[in-house]
Image (tube, rainbow, N blue to C red):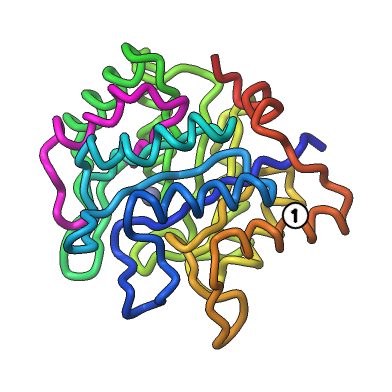
């Protein structure tokens, strides 16, 4: 089986200090946490940033730069910058795509709209066309975030129109309250619809995190971990760092004989330039 790419999703845009005192908020905390994950075996970090004053998610490129620069100086991590534009707040397209100017190797591409609490995480057809075009032009590989089957079909349509290029790289998001459930059946159903030569990673949200990680690991997929998706190591036990999640996956992968990909090996697997 291919070596395992571990992606660490460091902070997301919505987890507060009330939910866990350990969530990285400032650019320095986010960079530090990413470095710890790299040391523990992550080859990719998925980066959101927060306004250090309010703690809220932001697409401010200057704040992204304060995370990206130290990571480029001190690690060989593959950076996947978010273009989510704060789900629910749905920032303007230009703000969402500004991070592409930092030339990350990967950027998240949320392949459709979905309800979120009482709001909607909006990714209109016009946004998807603009985001795909912009990533193509800037040489950034889209990480196709899939919350439900229709989003895979959307990606295949965009590929057929020449806006997305093979080999596609999917991140399957299971267990959000309004999307595909975090079950084996659901994972297999999504996998059945991926094009043959694509690469994929998966994660389950919250309590479903570990079962989905293990299923992905054993099915030849890659795994995403981190506080954006899950705060607890087990019931009632908060992770005090993101690296704890990476360490656990490295441990399990060792037991089942799946080797861990270094960032260089992950670049080869994902066909990054
Ligand atoms: Zn994210």
| Residue 163 in picture, x, y percent from top left | 34, 17
Judge whether 92 appears above or below 117 on screen.
Answer: above
The quarter in which the C terminus is drawn is top right
Quadrant housing residue 134: top left
The answer to whether 261 appears left or right of 206 in the picture is right
Residue 266 magenta-highlighted:
no
| Residue at the image point whose x is 72% and y is 42% from the top | 4
Label 1 SS: helix
Left or right, 3 with respect to 178, comes to right
Local packing at callout 1 (Cα closer than 10 Å; few below 14, some 14-19, many 20+) is some
- At horizontal 83% and vertical 46% (from top left) the residue drawn is 258
Instruction: Using the image as rendered, state which of residue 30 and residue 151 is in the foreground.
Output: 30
Quadrant of res 111: top left
Q: Residue 203: x and y, percent?
A: 55, 56
Q: Residue at x 67, y 26 (%)?
A: 264
The stretch in magenta equals 87-111
Q: Is residue 62 above or below residue 255?
A: above
The residue wearing badge 1 is: 250
User: x, y (%) of residue 142?
Assistant: 42, 29
């Amino acid at each position: 089986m291919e070596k395992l790419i571990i992606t660490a999703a460091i902070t997301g845009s919505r987890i507060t200090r009330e939910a866990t005192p350990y969530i990285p908020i400032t650019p320095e905390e986010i960079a530090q946490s990413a470095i710890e994950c790299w040391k523990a075996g992550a080859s990719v970090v998925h980066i959101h940033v927060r306004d250090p004053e309010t703690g809220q998610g932001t697409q401010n490129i200057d704040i992204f730069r304060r995370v990206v620069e130290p990571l480029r100086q001190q690690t060989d991590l593959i950076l996947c910058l978010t273009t989510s534009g704060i789900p629910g707040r749905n920032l303007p397209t230009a703000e969402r795509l500004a991070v592409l100017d930092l030339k990350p190797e990967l950027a998240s591409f949320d392949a459709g709209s979905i309800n979120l609490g009482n709001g909607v995480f909006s990714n209109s057809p016009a946004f998807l066309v603009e985001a795909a075009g912009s990533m193509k032009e800037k040489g950034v590989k889209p990480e196709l975030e899939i919350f439900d089957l229709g989003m895979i079909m959307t990606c295949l349509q965009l590929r057929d129109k020449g806006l997305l290029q093979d080999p596609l790289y999917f991140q399957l998001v299971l267990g959000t309250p309004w999307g595909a459930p975090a079950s084996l059946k659901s994972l297999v159903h999504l996998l059945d619809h991926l094009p043959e030569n694509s690469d994929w990673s998966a994660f389950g949200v919250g309590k479903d995190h570990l079962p989905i990680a293990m299923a992905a690991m054993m099915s030849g997929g890659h795994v995403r971990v981190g506080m954006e998706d899950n705060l607890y190591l087990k019931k009632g036990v908060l992770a005090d760092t993101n690296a704890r999640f990476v360490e656990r996956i490295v441990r399990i992968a060792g037991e089942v004989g799946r080797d861990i990909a270094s960032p260089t090996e992950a670049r080869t697997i994902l066909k990054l330039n």
